[in-house]
């Protein structure tokens, strides 16, 4: 859990980072890259508004426990000492920026920055690791797996790559393959215990859970599994909390649909998802993708049908819950939307890319209700996690003005 000291939004720090960025840019010749990096610096300059909102919210009684994500942690560094070249320094700046864009679901821009980072520093583990995760969050399954295998080519002992590959298999429903990857990475009791419970192997999970309770008693998944152990069974509610929260498709059409979606080509994306569903009607990723495309095209009722279909089979899927909430909100059903966004925030997996939009949704509802203290709380958190959304920034600024008015 974070407190205000963890937010690190001091103006002096931003100036220092900007000066360092300017120094890096003197070695670059690509105008497109320079423009991209400078745009990111402009976004960071809006952070003063977030600080003001947080302070004002606390003064006026709008504070509380902030749901702020843990800082993103890339995998461990390679054992070799990195070369301090201009290209590698620039690549690391791009990795940092790409990770921020990824957390804000600005995935097309994240892919561009991270691909360039791997070109500038082909053996930089952090760049390939971040690219693999960005591809994963953007439902580019084959590209994500290739990036993680590239990590293993650079460093065969990079066990984090095995973990990511295991999670891809887990979310794709291939739990046997997930176990193989986890074995290659070294035994991880939490994931094995989770798989055992979901596969109804309660006796195999029990000793692992007891060990986890001793070692990491506050882990969100361990708390759920400990409750199952005390109950003597995995109830439907507990199962829902342990089930996969993402969906992975290996369909080329689904992957194309998501690329088009993040490129804001929603009609083409919807058509690509439709082709994927004609070949595989139960492709959950394509179903959710079509739902999001229809929502962006201004047909929330049709989008709701796709989200409802996905949630029937995958009730804990973050993207379907968030999309369903926005569909209801667009149709004037704010209370139902609030309940779904709260479900998104209550699920145990952290961090994930649906949190900023869910916080934005809650903030929007409370702003419209005139509850500016709560609106401020949620919008400020959303802005911290995703400083690239102008709608959130505008709404937060309006909220601060409302709170500051006499």
Image (cartoon, helix red, strand yellow):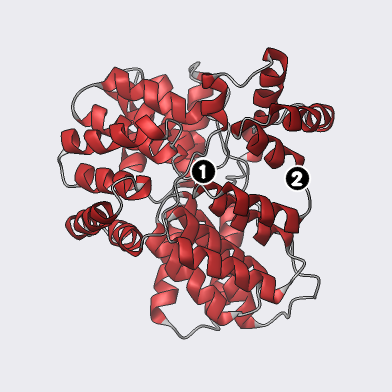
- C-alpha gap between disc 1 and disc 2: 21 Å
Residue 209 in picture, x, y percent from top left: 76, 29
Q: Residues within 10 Å of mark 1 (few under 14, many from 20)?
A: some
**What is the quadrant of residue 164 in the picture?**
bottom right
**93 or 57: nearer the viewer:** 93
Q: Is residue 384 above or below residue 122?
A: above
- Label 2 packing within 10 angstroms: few (<14), some (14-19), many (20+): few
Quadrant containing the N terminus is top right
Residue lying at 31% horizontally and 20% vertically, measured from the top left = 336
Residue located beneath label 1 in the image: 352
Please give the name of the residue rendered at 66% of the width and 78% of the height, measured from the top-left corner.
Answer: 123
Residue occupied by mark 2:
188
- Label whose residue precedes the other's in the sequence (1 or 2): 2
SS class, disc 2: loop
Q: Is residue 127 visible?
A: no
Where the C terminus falls, by quadrant?
A: top left
Residue 321 location, quadrant: top left
Instruction: Out of 23 and 405, give the one closest to the viewer.
Output: 23
Q: Is 185 drawn above or below residue 115 in the view shown?
A: above
Residue 195 in sight in this render: yes
Q: State the residue lying farthest toward the bottom.
A: 29
């Amino acid at each position: 859990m974070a407190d205000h000291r963890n937010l690190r939004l001091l103006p002096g720090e931003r100036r220092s980072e900007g000066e360092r960025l300017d120094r890096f840019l003197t070695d670059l010749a690509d105008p497109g890259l320079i423009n991209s990096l400078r745009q990111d610096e402009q976004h960071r300059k809006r952070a003063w508004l977030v600080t003001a909102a947080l302070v004002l919210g606390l003064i006026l009684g709008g504070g509380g426990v902030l749901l702020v994500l843990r800082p993103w942690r890339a995998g461990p560094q390679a054992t070799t000492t990195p070369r301090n070249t201009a290209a590698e320094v620039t690549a690391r700046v791009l990795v940092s920026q790409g990770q921020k864009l990824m957390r804000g679901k600005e995935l097309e821009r994240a892919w561009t920055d991270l691909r360039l980072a791997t070109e500038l520093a082909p053996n930089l583990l952090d760049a390939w690791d971040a690219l693999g995760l960005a591809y994963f969050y953007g439902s580019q399954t084959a590209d994500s797996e290739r990036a993680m295998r590239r990590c293993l080519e650079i460093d065969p002992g990079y066990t984090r790559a095995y973990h990511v590959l295991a999670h891809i298999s887990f979310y794709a429903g291939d739990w046997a393959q997930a176990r193989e990857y986890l074995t290659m990475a070294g035994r991880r009791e939490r994931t094995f215990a989770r798989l055992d419970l979901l596969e109804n192997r309660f006796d195999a999970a029990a000793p692992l859970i007891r060990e986890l309770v001793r070692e990491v008693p506050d882990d969100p998944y361990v708390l759920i599994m400990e409750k199952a152990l005390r109950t003597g069974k995995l109830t439907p509610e507990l199962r829902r909390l342990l089930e996969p929260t993402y969906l992975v498709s290996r369909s080329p059409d689904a992957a194309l649909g998501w690329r088009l979606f993040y490129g804001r080509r929603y009609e083409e994306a919807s058509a690509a998802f439709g082709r994927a569903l004609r070949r595989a009607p139960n492709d959950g990723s394509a179903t959710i993708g079509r739902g999001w495309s229809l929502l962006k095209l201004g047909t929330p009722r049709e989008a709701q049908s796709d989200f409802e279909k996905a949630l029937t089979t995958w009730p804990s899927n973050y993207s379907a819950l968030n999309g369903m909430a926005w569909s209801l909100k667009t149709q004037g059903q704010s209370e139902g939307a609030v309940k779904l966004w709260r479900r998104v925030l209550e699920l145990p997996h952290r961090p994930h890319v649906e949190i900023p939009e869910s916080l934005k949704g809650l903030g929007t509802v409370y702003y419209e209700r005139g509850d500016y203290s709560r609106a401020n709380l949620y919008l400020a958190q959303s802005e911290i996690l995703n400083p690239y959304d102008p709608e959130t920034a505008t709404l937060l600024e309006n909220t601060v003005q409302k709170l500051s008015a006499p």
